[in-house]
Image (cartoon, grey):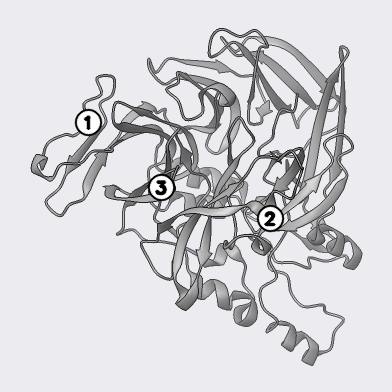
């Protein structure tokens, strides 16, 4: 999934996250590879193409009233409330036997994985008390789907809800009708929810990291009706709160009121979480500066001068892969002492006099101006379990120019890289008869925009050492993609 249309009529989309959703498919069958793609016919796309203008406000692009209307009609349009985008350009995941493309709003769109045709839009607000969900759900082996989203309740109360969508039943009844809120996390601020991109899940617990990047809710609610703003205009950073870790039990769903705190950082993606000897180990792709993710969202603005973007990247804080360890059993009498007793990590958790537990991480990966992002693991076998290997993109000043493999225990790394080649998120596919965790292949779409013939290809790497097995070249330039899925 990714953005594929950056202007409509005479109007451009200003941000990378605003391009209209384009789904790509490489179909591997009988020794042949067939590439296909199709725009998802969301309301945002269909109405934009029909009216030849931006109709629904996106993350960084504001939609204005129809210029053909008279001044009184345009004035009252501003007071008709917020029209939320359904531009599902971020990811795709299964619910039962179906596949849904998604963004981070309350809308998901069912697509046919064979033809890529758009089937229907689903408004999750019709089933659940959420105002939006992340594009990174967790899916158990039986098909149960878990996700997290903001909830604005009565009296402007604010919380983060864990959503559970049950697996497909024998009678194939509507799974959405049986979905429910499993547990609720409190918010550190009443009118300013943190931006949530992903969350962690172990076999028995959920992990939610509340970061300093905030959405000013009051500004958000007045953006469309009064000021004509977009989502990005409502972001701000609270440099005083630091970062909070929240825990909840999975079954039954129950919030665990331990106050885990650490210095300010931000994240897009969790790598993995697992339980070990009374501790929860949390591995994250972090950005050090508390304002960095906030600024990064602006750097992805397509109107930015590229040289200015590179200069800003040089000044950006050092990204790191970090490991935090959260003790489940907390004793106040051990104030000032490190509560972490796992022998294989230097991460610490110290009880403070005010009852909070201060966390310090172990750094698993850090390179000069290099980020390890878009992480993947052997998800079907090791999600929520003690694992060894993570795969991801190496971002050089925000630009993904390599595929990386990281041993989170030894900190050894492997690299695949080719000049002027820009890969996408590497998807791990396990070998049918695999015995080892990394016995499988990685799939990545690679683009070479400077090449006139066959400027893109599907790359297949051996997951053990990142040596190339094969590539399937296509004679078309593929726009940037964000996340995807392997469907056997």
**Secondary-structure class at tag 3:** strand
Gap in Å between the C-alphas at discs 2 and 3?
Answer: 29 Å
Gap in Å between the C-alphas at discs 2 and 1?
Answer: 42 Å
The residue at the far front in this view is: 171
Task: Return the disc, 2 or 1, that comes first in the chain's sequence.
Answer: 2
Q: Is residue 319 above or below residue 46?
A: above
**Contact (CB < 8 A) between labels 2 and 1?**
no
State the image quarter where residue 466 is shown.
top right
Q: Quadrant of the N terminus?
A: top right
**Secondary-structure class at tag 1:** loop
The residue that mark 2 highlights is 177
Residue at point 66%, 37% (across, down): 483
Nearer the observer: mark 2 or 1; the answer is 2
x and y percentages locating residue 448 in the rendered image: 74, 28
Gap in Å between the C-alphas at discs 1 and 3?
Answer: 19 Å
Q: Left or right: where does residue 327 sit relative to residue 99?
A: left
Residue at point 24%, 19% (across, down): 343
Res 69 visible: yes
The residue that mark 3 highlights is 209
x and y percentages locating residue 240 in the rendered image: 29, 59
């Amino acid at each position: 999934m990714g953005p594929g249309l950056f202007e409509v009529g005479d109007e451009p989309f200003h941000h990378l996250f605003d391009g209209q959703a384009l789904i790509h498919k490489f179909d591997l069958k009988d020794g042949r590879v067939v590439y296909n793609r199709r725009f998802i016919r969301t309301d945002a796309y269909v109405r934009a193409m029909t009216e030849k203008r931006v109709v629904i406000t996106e993350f960084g692009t504001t939609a204005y009233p129809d210029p053909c209307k008279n001044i009184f009609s345009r004035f009252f349009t501003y007071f008709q409330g917020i029209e939320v985008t359904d531009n599902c350009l971020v990811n795709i995941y299964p619910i039962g036997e179906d596949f849904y493309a998604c963004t981070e709003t309350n809308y998901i769109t069912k697509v046919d994985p064979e033809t890529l045709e758009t089937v229907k839009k689903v408004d999750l607000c019709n089933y659940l008390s959420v105002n939006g969900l992340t594009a990174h759900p967790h899916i158990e082996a039986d098909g149960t789907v878990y996700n997290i989203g903001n909830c604005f309740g009565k009296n402007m109360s604010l919380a983060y809800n864990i959503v559970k969508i049950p697996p497909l039943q024998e009678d194939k009844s509507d799974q959405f009708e049986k979905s429910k809120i499993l547990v609720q996390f409190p918010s550190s601020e009443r009118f300013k929810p943190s931006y949530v991109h992903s969350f962690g899940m172990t076999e028995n617990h959920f992990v939610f990291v509340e970061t300093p990047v905030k959405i000013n809710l009051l500004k958000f609610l007045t953006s469309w009706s009064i000021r004509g703003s977009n989502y990005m205009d409502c972001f701000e950073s609270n440099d005083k709160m630091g970062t909070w870790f929240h825990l909840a039990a999975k079954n039954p769903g129950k919030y665990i009121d331990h106050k885990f705190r650490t210095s300010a950082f931000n994240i897009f993606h969790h790598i993995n979480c697992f339980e070990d000897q009374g501790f929860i180990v949390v591995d994250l792709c972090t950005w050090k500066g508390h304002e960095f993710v906030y600024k990064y969202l602006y750097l992805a603005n397509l109107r930015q001068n590229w040289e200015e973007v590179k200069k800003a990247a040089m000044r950006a804080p050092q990204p790191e892969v970090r490991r935090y360890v959260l003790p489940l059993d907390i004793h106040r009498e051990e104030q000032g002492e490190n509560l972490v007793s796992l022998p294989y990590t230097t991460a610490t958790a110290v009880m403070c006099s005010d009852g909070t537990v201060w966390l310090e991480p172990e750094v698993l990966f850090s390179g000069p101006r290099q980020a390890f992002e878009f992480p993947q693991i052997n998800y079907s076998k090791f999600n929520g379990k003690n694992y060894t290997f993570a795969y991801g993109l190496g971002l050089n000043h925000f630009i993904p120019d390599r595929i990386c493999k990281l041993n989170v225990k030894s900190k050894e790394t492997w690299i695949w890289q080719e000049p002027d080649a820009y890969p996408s998120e590497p998807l791990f596919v396990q070998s049918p008869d695999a015995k080892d965790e990394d016995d499988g292949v990685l799939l990545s779409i690679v683009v070479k925009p400077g090449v006139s013939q066959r400027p893109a290809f599907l790359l297949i790497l051996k997951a053990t050492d990142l040596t190339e097995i094969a590539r399937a070249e296509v004679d078309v330039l593929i726009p940037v993609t964000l996340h995807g899925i392997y469907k056997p």
